[in-house]
Image (tube, rainbow, N blue to C red):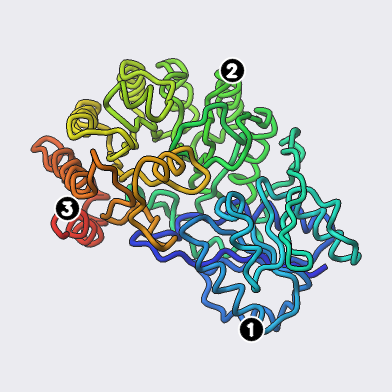
Amino acid sequence: MRVLLINPKVNLPIDVRSSPSLGLAYLAAMSEKQGDEVRVLDMEVEDTPLQQVVREHDPEVIGLTANTIQIKGAWQVATELKQITTAPIVLGGPHPTFLAAESVERPEIDIVVRGEGELTWVDLCTHLGQGKPLDTVEGIAYQRDGTVIHNPDRPVVTDVDSLPLPAYHLLKMDRYTNLQPTLDRIEGDSYPLLSSRGCPYRCTYCSQILPRRWRARSAQNVVAEWHWLVKELGAKEIGVLDDSFNIDRQRVLEICDLIIAEGLNHVPWIMINGIRANLVDEELLGRMREAGCIRTAFGVESGNQRILDSVIDKHLTLDQVRAAFKAAKAVGMETIGFFIIGLPGETEETMDDTIRFACELDPLVANFSMATPFPGTEMYNQVLEKGRLLVEDWDDFAFFENKAQFETDDMPAELVQRKWREAYRRFYLRPGRMASTLLRKRTWQGLPRTIRMAWKTVVSS
């Protein structure tokens, strides 16, 4: 079967060419394992006309992926595809998982895949290739005689070691930047790696499409991919994308020991989405550092304990966060802190707590975002019940923009936007912070981009 997989372009004020779509790379690998002929089109790095790709590959099925800020782009691509091919168009990803009917009801979308995609994709393609009815394909939504049909959910992959290696050979890896281009300039290819899936926690702001369950690959399986990336693909940087990498302390130590034993620790690696601050200590972070980890992030979110406990259900204390940052700095690991301004139930005082806490922790990078109620999250339901959405377009859910997406009677948008700008000013314009930043070589390499983003974020609006 001829398969075409597409990652639609996203309109964002940041560089999103830093990493290939790992989800599509896994789907492509599953298709190739079935004997399919696969083409992957990442519209973030490729400018080959869609009509040319379709003409050359002549796909029998087409898959698109979309999160909330991609969804309109995915619909547009699907509309263009309908003009040039009769191949069924399948849409998956976080946004259509939560709002399947919204997409299935559109004439350009034939089928929506909900949740984890690999097994559903293979099953669906088999049915389509053999012309079988879709009734027994778990995890999909589609229309029949004008009625939207939601087939039962598909159970998640339990043996994640059984999944094939991502099909990076189908992606134009030389066209991506490195995984954190604002901090590093890597000469060579950067590769993402996913060592576990899911999360046992469920923070109210998180649009986790998988069940509240953590499924980990074995340390041996993870390091086998690590070896492949370094020795066969020539990786110069690896970024671990797990939502919850360090749930199992012993597994992390075993991964690190194997990386060291195989001599792979000369290649730097970073924790893209962060690790749980309540599950680290100096020994664990020290072993990660010895294994080559140069930077980790922590999802701090708020500097107010009430907000952590009763608003976002973080299962984390401020003292645990302090201890985690102290341990990371003690072993020489760079840190990133993720903070959220304007969570439901916040006041000016609680937002001030977050800004002060960020300054106290003093990570290499403090990333402040305005609370964004993505569909499928508990926060989305809270806002619909107690507040007002201020966006009318899914494109406006890009949390890199300097606009609040919602407000409540007690927390107007103007206050959130003001405190967000204030957070960046108070953190980055401290004399000590400015001096240390100016000493970093990467600061001068990225100065033009920094000035543009600073003007947009702090000065304008």
Disc 1 to disc 2, how far (Cα)? 50 Å
* Disc nearer the start of the sequence (1/2): 1
Compared to residue 398, the image places residue 369 above or below, namely above
Could you tell me which secondary element the residue under label 2 belongs to?
A: helix
Instruction: Tell me the number on the disc at residue 52.
Output: 1
Dividing the image into 4 quarters, which one contains the C terminus?
A: bottom left
Dividing the image into 4 quarters, which one contains the N terminus?
A: bottom right
Could you tell me which secondary element the residue under label 3 belongs to?
A: helix
Query: x and y percent of residue 200 in the render?
Result: 57, 26
Query: Which quarter of the picture shows residue 347?
Result: top left
Is residue 270 visible in the rendered image? The answer is no
* Disc nearer the start of the sequence (2/3): 2
Query: x and y percent of residue 374 in the render?
Result: 45, 48
Judge depth for marks 1 and 3 and give the one in front.
Answer: 3
Disc 2 to disc 3, how far (Cα)? 43 Å
Disc 1 to disc 3, how far (Cα)? 43 Å
Instruction: Tell me the number on the disc at residue 458.
Output: 3
Q: Could you tell me if the residues under marks 1 and 3 are in contact, i.e. CB atoms within 8 Å?
A: no
The residue singled out by tag 2 in the image is 250
* x 38%, y 62%: residue: 12
Q: Could you tell me if the residues under marks 2 and 3 are in contact, i.e. CB atoms within 8 Å?
A: no
* x 18%, y 35%: residue: 348
Q: Residue 282 versus residue 147: which sits nearer the camera? A: 147
Is residue 350 visible in the rendered image? The answer is yes
* x 38%, y 24%: residue: 310
Query: x and y percent of residue 378 in the render?
Result: 47, 37
Q: Residues within 10 Å of mark 1 (few under 14, many from 20)?
A: few
Query: Which quarter of the picture shows residue 135?
Result: bottom right
The amino acid beneath tag 2 is: Gln
